[in-house]
Image (tube, rainbow, N blue to C red):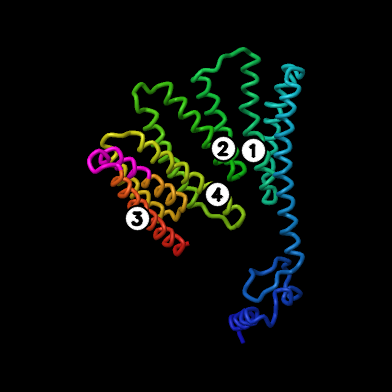
Amino acid sequence: MDKTQILQFIASQLQAGTITVADLLPFTQSAVPAPSMPGTVIPETAAAKVSSNHLINIFYAIGGIVVISGIVILIAQYWSDLGYAGRVAVTLGIGGVTFIAGLLQRGPGSRIISQVFLTLAFVLLPLGIGVVLDEADINPTLELGIGISSGLAALYVVAWAFTRRNVTILYTVIYASAAYYATVIKFADYKDALIWATIVLGISYLLLGCYVRSATSEDSAHTKERNSVRTLLYFFGTLAVLGGAISLGGIWDIVLIAVIFGFFYLSVFLRSRGILVLSGIFLIGHLIHLTTKYFADVIGWPIALVICGFIIMGCGYGTYYLGKMLSNKQ
């Protein structure tokens, strides 16, 4: 019997439940259990290790929330007594320390604590910069806002390059979006500039979500986090594009219908329920808007309501059907 036949025989016995992975462990030199199969039993030590890791991660998250709460209470109660140095220390100082700590925690087992530190820094760094500017009696301007937001975004790009932590993607996007809007407000001089800027930003979110979707990892927890980031980018990207487009009016009232149906197709292509649900909501709302705006005076308000009702039922069925397609693909 050659090696292939032996492995096939062992696999069949594992599936039948005749033997378990625990029975094979004494004959191997690896302490890592094989992937679970029907009928296999994971050793208690491995299950205990997983449970312990989850508990530690929960404590990390709770600890981060308690730290932020403590700093907020400290600032609220003793702000006037802290003085300039104290105010800077509890905001910018702690923010810088936690950011560096997040960069240093680069090991696979430090994923959660690293992201907690980086989250603390995300909250405290801009607050600390605001304290410094206030104490220096520097009035906030758009130029200053662009510079600070761009600098913080670049800082979190560096954090992503060093740690590859998924949370840094979101924080980079938030800071970069703030700098983007400040730039648009500074230099745009026509009415619909912010609307078009929002649409462009939404498209950028969708493209970034596609990039995050294409990145793979052998770590299931890491993949789950990336999927959460991708879902948020898809959601806010869709909201920005459709929300901006629906605000344009005029000929765009007609064009938007085609755009929404394009997002229906995109939801199937990207396998995103968030895009599907938002597209359905926008389609229903926009069709009701068109009916009341252009046809209520022609066919009467009651008949317009009846038409809207049938349209909503049709949209609901179409959304349900596409949702089943997504479930079958996933």
Location of residue 63 (image quadrant): top right
Q: Which residue is disc 3 drawn over?
A: 314
Q: Which residue is mark 2?
A: 171
User: What residue appears at the point 67 percent right and 45 percent down from the top-left corner?
Assistant: 106
The residue at the far left in this view is: 298
Residue 251 rendering spot, x and y as whole percentages: 26, 36
* Gap in angstroms between the C-alphas marked 2 and 3: 39 Å
Who comes first in sequence, dot 1 or dot 4?
1
Q: Where is the N terminus found, in terms of image quarters?
A: bottom right
* Nearer the camera: disc 2 or disc 3: 3
> Mark 4 or 2 closer to N-term?
2
- Toward which corner of the image does residue 289 lie, by quadrant? top left
Local packing at callout 1 (Cα closer than 10 Å; few below 14, some 14-19, many 20+) is many
Instruction: Specify start and end residues of the magenta stretch as a single range.
Output: 285-301
How far apart are the two marked residues, 1 and 2, measured between alpha carbons? 8 Å
Residue 73 versus residue 59: which sits nearer the camera?
A: 73
Above/below status of 2 relative to 198: below
Along the line of sight, the residue nearer the viewer: 67 or 218: 67
Left or right of residue 114, residue 193 in this image: left
- Residue type at tag 4: Ser
The kind of residue tagged 1 is Thr
Q: Which secondary structure, mark 3? A: helix
What kind of secondary structure does the magenta stretch mostly adopt?
Answer: helix
In contact (CB < 8 Å): disc 1 and disc 2: yes
The numbered dot on residue 228 is 4
- The answer to whether the residue labelled 4 contacts the one labelled 3, judged by CB atoms less than 8 Å apart, is no
